[in-house]
């Protein structure tokens, strides 16, 4: 089953400094049919104006992954972590027992991110933050694991998560096809950051979401050059 959620159908709000689109119920947007996809709880498509950002605020018991599409985001938290994550790179924050953080766009132009929240497998873990550069050539025509808590990814160099799931990215040239397995009892959510693709023959446009379950293999073909972000989690 492939459930396509067109970008135009997403909830959201434009706050001036922040133009946010929500793939799932979030903040003032509520849709009972879009609460989560397996363990995936939030996928926000955020545009943050230059010189603005999210003031310090708390989280707990959530795995929060930020994929930077354009610009850069600067992180600071009460654990002493600071860092700047640029386009194409990733940061993770395991909120665990609690963390207070801020995320600012200190760049001269707008920053565009995907902010992804995954429900952890266990509550009360030790908080953690990390960021890493992932050269895009490593994901040409195939998915690279960016962040993961899956056992099979322990030696991959991916950023660590406290959940049996993973965040992956791939780049496809127009006409290229890749095949990605999806195990029994697993769920995937795919968003093209750029470009248009088909998944097992189903069209998925730029910044659309595609929820995928009960498909043993995802055959993804690019209708045009595409940058893909995929989350794979338990379907429970």
Image (cartoon, grey):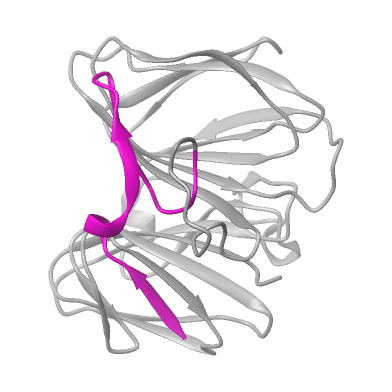
The answer to if 4 sits in the magenta stretch is yes
Residue at horizontal 29%, vertical 23%?
15
Q: Is residue 78 above or below residue 203?
A: above
Which residue does the image show at 84% across and 36% down from the upper left?
A: 125
Quarter of the image where the C terminus is located:
bottom right
Of residues 101 and 15, the one drawn nearer to the viewer in this rendering: 15
Q: Quadrant of residue 195?
A: bottom left
- Residue found at x 72% / y 56%: 154
Q: Is residue 63 magenta?
A: no
Q: Is residue 35 placed above or below 49 in the rendered structure?
A: below
194 left or right of 94? left
All told, the count of numbered labels is 0
* Residue 162 image position (x, y, % from top left): 75, 47
- Quarter-of-image position of residue 150: bottom right
Q: Nearer the viewer, residue 8 or 113?
A: 8
Name the residue at 29% across, 61% down: 208
Residue extent of the magenta highlight: 1-26
Instruction: Note whether residue 100 is visible.
Output: yes
Where residue 151 appears, as percent x and y from the top left, is 76, 63
Q: Quadrant of residue 222?
A: bottom left
Horizontal and vertical percent position of residue 200: 34, 88
- Please give left or right for residue 154 compared with residue 143 in the image: right
Against 48, residue 23 (above or below) is below
Decide if residue 20 is in sight here.
no
Q: Position of residue 232 (x, y in %)?
A: 57, 65
Q: From what the image shows, is residue 58 above or below residue 194?
A: above
| Near-viewer residue (172 or 52) | 52
């Amino acid at each position: 089953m492939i459930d396509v959620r067109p970008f135009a159908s997403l909830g959201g709000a434009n706050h001036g400094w922040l133009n946010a689109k929500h793939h799932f119920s979030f903040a003032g947007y509520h849709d009972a049919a879009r609460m989560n996809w397996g363990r995936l709880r939030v996928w926000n498509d955020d545009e943050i104006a230059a010189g603005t950002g999210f003031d310090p605020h708390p989280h707990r018991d959530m795995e929060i992954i930020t994929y930077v599409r354009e610009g850069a985001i600067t992180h600071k938290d009460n654990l002493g972590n600071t860092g700047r994550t640029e386009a194409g790179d990733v940061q993770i924050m395991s909120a665990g027992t609690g963390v207070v953080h801020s995320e600012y766009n200190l760049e001269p132009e707008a920053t565009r991110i995907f902010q992804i929240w995954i429900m952890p497998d266990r509550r009360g873990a030790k908080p953690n933050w990390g960021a890493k550069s992932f050269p895009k050539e490593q994901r040409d025509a195939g998915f690279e694991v960016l962040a993961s808590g899956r056992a099979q990814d322990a030696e991959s160099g991916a950023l660590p998560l406290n959940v049996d799931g993973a965040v992956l990215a791939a780049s496809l040239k127009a006409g290229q096809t890749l095949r990605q397995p999806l195990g029994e009892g697993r769920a995937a959510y795919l968003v093209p950051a750029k470009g248009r693709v088909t998944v097992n023959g189903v069209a998925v446009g730029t910044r659309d979401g595609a929820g995928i379950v009960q498909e043993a293999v995802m055959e993804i073909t690019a209708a045009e050059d595409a940058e893909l972000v995929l989350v794979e989690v338990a379907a429970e």
